[in-house]
Amino acid sequence: MATLNITPAAAEQIHRALAERGQGLGLRVSVKPSGCSGYSYVLDFADEEHSDDIRFEAHGASVYVAPDALEMLDGSEVDYVSEGLNRFFRFNNPNVKDQCGCGESFTV
């Protein structure tokens, strides 16, 4: 069975973003071919659950993953971090074999 861990910081940010937006079920995560290393993460709001979605829940927050992205995301941790003035979701993904220098794309 696939796993995806959601940190308390990520759950808090998902709740905050949905509250500001006024709607939504959670965060939708997928991957797409992109960048110099192969793939990049795509984040969006999940306003409805698709019949083939895999839903992960922790700390009262839900993350929805499309089946075609599950193999690349299996075992990952979704975190929300602050680095200087930047705040963003970070994926600690054990499947990543290499990343581009800017950190925007990865290879599995």
Image (cartoon, rainbow, N blue to C red):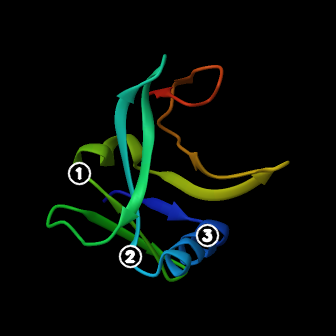
Q: Nearer the viewer, mark 2 or mark 3?
A: 2
Q: Earlier in the sequence, mark 2 or mark 1?
A: 2
Identity of the amino acid at label 1?
Pro
Disc 1 residue crowd, few under 14, some 14–19, many 20+, Cα 10 Å: few
Q: Which mark is residue 14?
A: none
Residue at the disc numbered 3:
13
Nearest to the observer: residue 95 or residue 99? 99
Q: Measure how far apart labels 2 and 3 are at the Cα level.
A: 13 Å
**For the view shown, which residue lies furthest in the front direction?**
21
Label 1–label 3 contact, CB within 8 A: no
Residue at the disc numbered 1:
67
Question: Which residue is painted at 27% across and 63% down in the image?
Answer: 54
Q: Earlier in the sequence, mark 1 or mark 3?
A: 3
Nearest to the observer: residue 4 or residue 11? 11
Identify the element where label 2 is drawn. Answer: loop
Identity of the amino acid at label 3?
Gln
Residue at the disc numbered 2:
24
